[in-house]
Amino acid sequence: MNKRNKIVALAGLAHAGMLGGAYFIFEKLMGLPPCAMCFWQRYPHGAAIVIAIAALFLPGPVLPVLGLLAALTTGGIGVYHAGVEQKWWAGPSSCTGSGQDLGALSGTDLLAVDAAPKLVMCDQISWQWLGLSMPAWNAVVSFGIAIIWIMAIRASRRTVY
């Protein structure tokens, strides 16, 4: 395996670690369900994993550039989400505020007596460490993974196939 593919594999594993780690640690071990914006942050990680796998088989810098864009996208969503949690700016009305948007529920939903899934608001911090919430940590780590993708792009330009 050449240097470029080792770097691409590292980037793909980092994205997989972010997805798997968040799911296992926060959802399964800690019982913290994700909010809508948490799911938004997961999609670019998933895309980056697929891109990394494809980049292992297809030469050139194009796929690493797409991996970089995926890492920057999830990092940007993480910054946006962290800002919503800190009340620096408004978030989507569908998952912020009081959560009392009863107009969006049907009559059946309002009268249901079985346990409904817990509504997780995007503007409430459910976990933080060292002063940073989950989306803020996602941004920090994702921007770190972006550096790995930049290394893969640079290695792609030097690799002879």
Image (cartoon, rainbow, N blue to C red):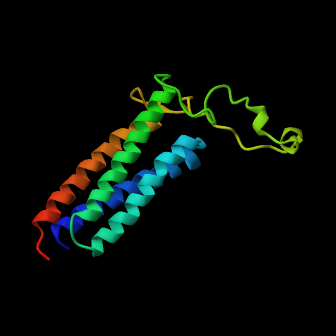
The quadrant the N terminus occupies is: bottom left
**Vertical side of 91 occupied by 26: above or below:** below
**Vertical side of 19 occupied by 102: above or below:** above
Left or right of residue 88, residue 56 in this image: left
Residue located 32% across and 57% down the image: 67
Question: Hey, which quadrant is residue 60 in on the image?
Answer: bottom left
The quadrant the C terminus occupies is: bottom left
* Residue 93 in picture, x, y percent from top left: 61, 32
Say which of 6 and 61 sits in front: 61
* Residue 87 in picture, x, y percent from top left: 50, 22
**Vertical side of 59 occupied by 94: above or below:** above
* Residue 70 in picture, x, y percent from top left: 37, 53
Residue located 35% across and 50% down the image: 71
Q: How many marks?
A: 0
* Residue 65 in picture, x, y percent from top left: 27, 57
Left or right of residue 160, residue 52 in this image: right
Residue located 54% across and 31% down the image: 91
Left or right of residue 143, residue 108 in this image: right
Residue located 39% across and 62% down the image: 49
